[in-house]
Amino acid sequence: MSIQLPSQYGIIIRKSAQTREAIVGMRQRSRGFSRNEDEHLAGFWLAGNPQEAEHQCEELAAAYSVRPDIDFVMTVSSDGVLGPMPAWLQENEQPVDTFSVPGTAGLARAKPRLTWAQERAIALRERRLSKLASRRVGDATAYRRWPELVSGDVSAFLGECWALVEFIEGSRTGGAARRWVEKTLPNKVWHISVHDGYANELRDYLKAYYQANGSPQALARVRRRAGEYLAGLEAGTQKGTVDVDCFDAWRRVHFAQFQGP
């Protein structure tokens, strides 16, 4: 036999002489709410948020002298058991999202469910790797577009950066550049795909560059972000969305207006 994972934030209690009164109390409390039991375990819904669930567990432990991890565990519908799996409990391979006392049902789940902390760590690592990859693409794109950067010539580069600010950041919610493209190049859908989206990063990096008197570190931030924007425009060529050709066409008409802050 086995029980289902309680919905939202819940509790699984091991049936014993120690927990008998606690289970009776939880049955009374949970009338009309989610609960399920077999001969070994009882599962109950506690709350819709972790703070309330922890409060309920503290009250349960105080009222009935039951012990976390020894007599009961907290659960959450997306992660399963919160914390280490105790020896008296297993998550089953089949049916999914069920739990039992080891040896009373089927096989234990071969690959343990990731905890919230583990999933967060994986997501953060993937995001860092994605950001590093985006920076490498940004640098490569910038050096391809402005090869004179290698020799330290930044005059044309900075002018085009201010044009990118107006064309991309200034058109996030409308703007003159977007209206010009939509009127002049109506076959192009306005969409620019940039890693992690974009707000006013390039504008802010340019301002910081001037305030830092052109420091190499500040220039590197400008170069990478400008390259990321250009890479986003280059991706539009295959998608039929706003691309580098659109930017260059607009820049040739309006470039003189955006040479600096």
Image (cartoon, rainbow, N blue to C red):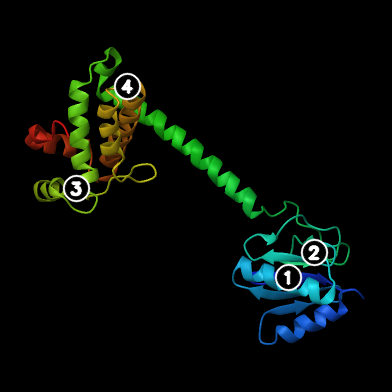
**From this viewpoint, is residue 218 visible?**
yes
Q: Nearer the viewer, mark 1 or mark 3?
A: 1
Residue at 22% over, 54% down: 173
Q: Are marks 2 and 4 in contact (CB under 8 Å)?
A: no
Is disc 2 surrounded by few (<14), some (14 to 19) or many (20+) residues within 10 Å? some
Say which residue label 3 marks: 188
Q: Reading the chain from its start, which is encountered first: label 2 or label 1? A: 1
Say which residue label 2 marks: 68
Mark 3 secondary-structure assignment: loop
- The CA distance from mark 4 to mark 1 is 56 Å
Figure quadrant of the C terminus:
top left
**From this viewpoint, is residue 4 visible?**
no
- The CA distance from mark 4 to mark 3 is 38 Å
- The CA distance from mark 2 to mark 3 is 60 Å
Q: Reading the chain from its start, which is encountered first: label 1 or label 3? A: 1
Residue at the top extreme?
Answer: 151
Say which residue label 1 marks: 57
Mark 2 secondary-structure assignment: loop
- The CA distance from mark 1 to mark 3 is 58 Å
Q: Are marks 2 and 1 in contact (CB under 8 Å)?
A: yes
Q: Position of residue 181 (x, y in %)?
A: 14, 46
Closer to the camera in the image, 226 or 4: 226
The amino acid pointed to by label 1 is: Cys
The amino acid pointed to by label 4 is: Ser
Say which residue label 4 marks: 215
